Image (cartoon, rainbow, N blue to C red):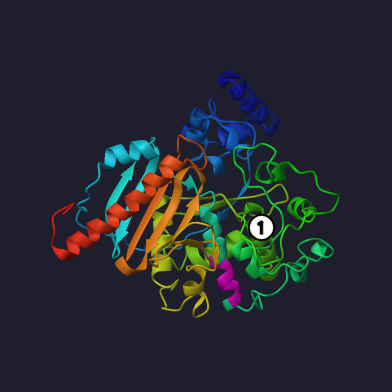
Amino acid sequence: MKPKRIALGVLAALVVAGAAGWFSLDKETRGLLATLPTNSDVLFWSEPQRDAAFRALDRLPFIAKAHVVPAGGTPLPLPPGPPLALAVDIDAYMAGQRSAALLIVHDGKLRLERYGLGFDAQGRWTSFSVAKSITSTLVGAAVEDGHIRSLDDKVSDYIPEFKGSAYEQVSLRHLLTMTSGVGWNEDYSNPDSDVAKFNNHQPEEGVDSLVSYLRRLPRVAPPGTRWNYSTGETNLVGQVLAAAIRKPLAQYLSEKIWVPAGMEQQATWLLSRSGQEISGCCIQAATRDFARFGVFILNGARGPDGRSIVPDGWLAEATTERVGIGRPERGYGFQWWTYSDGTFAARGIFGQGIFIDPGRKLVIASNADWGGGARDPQASDAREAFYRAVQKAIDDEAAGKPAGG
């Protein structure tokens, strides 16, 4: 679709919404409209469309509505520390990543904070699947609060519409580890994959669209025996969580993480067509607050009162390998990507990430719009190498060695 046609489509949507819809948008957002897409197929937007949209999804109600996640009144300080002596050309690295933001927090201090693509510390960038790790943490909170009895509870205990489907005997633990054994295709380049099609599924009358789509999928392996990455299943985790806590996920996120973790800005959480937070995706937040989430996890998910929001042992289990993913020294926990050295990460397509190294008291938060596509292998490998370079710089600093020594 050409830019002029895109702009006309957006303007038509605003005309339908009324003049108030246009004037309720800020100047920056109105300026972006000429390049913004008018459909929800993010996987097939152009690079300029993504650059514009990833910072503005929650300000464009004709693309998706959102719930606000309020912050508290006392932000967690991120005091500046001395610049980290990295043996890396940061400008070149950020250009290769098409970075919108890159932050390094070490031992509670901000050692690096850089922005690109016209983004800054006041903006909110979308999380994509980084939200999966946040949703997982909320499940831990629901277990601690007694809303969820056990991770071995069946999905159908909370959502009876799954009885008689391949999900009837699937547990919440299977969903968190993506080992349901139910068929799902997460190929981001294929418009006929499940991940591309399920948002546009037309459900049976009176049935939630996600439930309607998932309960028709076939079983391909016994539960617990096969890992298969599925955004649909994290969205289902959110459905189970919402049924258990009986309140909007955005409200629970504010109560359990955004306020106790000391976030600086409110966040937003995009909604599905049925009005449910899309729990496998799409929390819009400042990159500093994504970094604060990493610090919160690093510190045991403890609030100002020193109490953890999750049960004893939850984080140790959630952030270490529960299932192999077919790659040496890599695994998957409860919606966290794990490494054999005890580090772990939240990841989202197009370069969103939070890397956490407990041993080094290190958090690296990044937002980006990878130029090579949703999974961009070259950019992904470069990011892994950057993580290692940061770790080495911290080790060299502790040993009193010069950068790269």
Q: Pointer 1: residues within 10 angstroms few (<14), some, or many (20+)?
A: many
Tell me where residue 267 appears, x and y as whole percent.
50, 53
Q: Viewer-proximal residue, 41 or 246?
A: 41
Write down the residue under mark 1: 233
Query: Is 214 situated left or right of 151 in this image?
Result: right
Up/down of 12 relative to 197, above or below? above
Up/down of 43 relative to 290, above or below? above
Tell me where residue 277 appears, x and y as whole percent.
64, 54
Q: Viewer-proximal residue, 156 or 405?
A: 405
Q: Amino acid at mark 1?
A: Glu
* Main secondary structure of the magenta stretch: helix
Q: Viewer-proximal residue, 182 or 140?
A: 182
Tell me, yes or no, whether the highlighted magenta stretch contains residue 139: yes
Tell me where residue 305 appears, x and y as whole percent.
42, 78
Tell me where residue 3 appears, x and y as whole percent.
56, 21
- How many discs mark residues in the rendered view? 1
Magenta residues span 137-143
Query: Is 152 situated left or right of 284 in this image?
Result: right
Up/down of 11 relative to 58, above or below? above
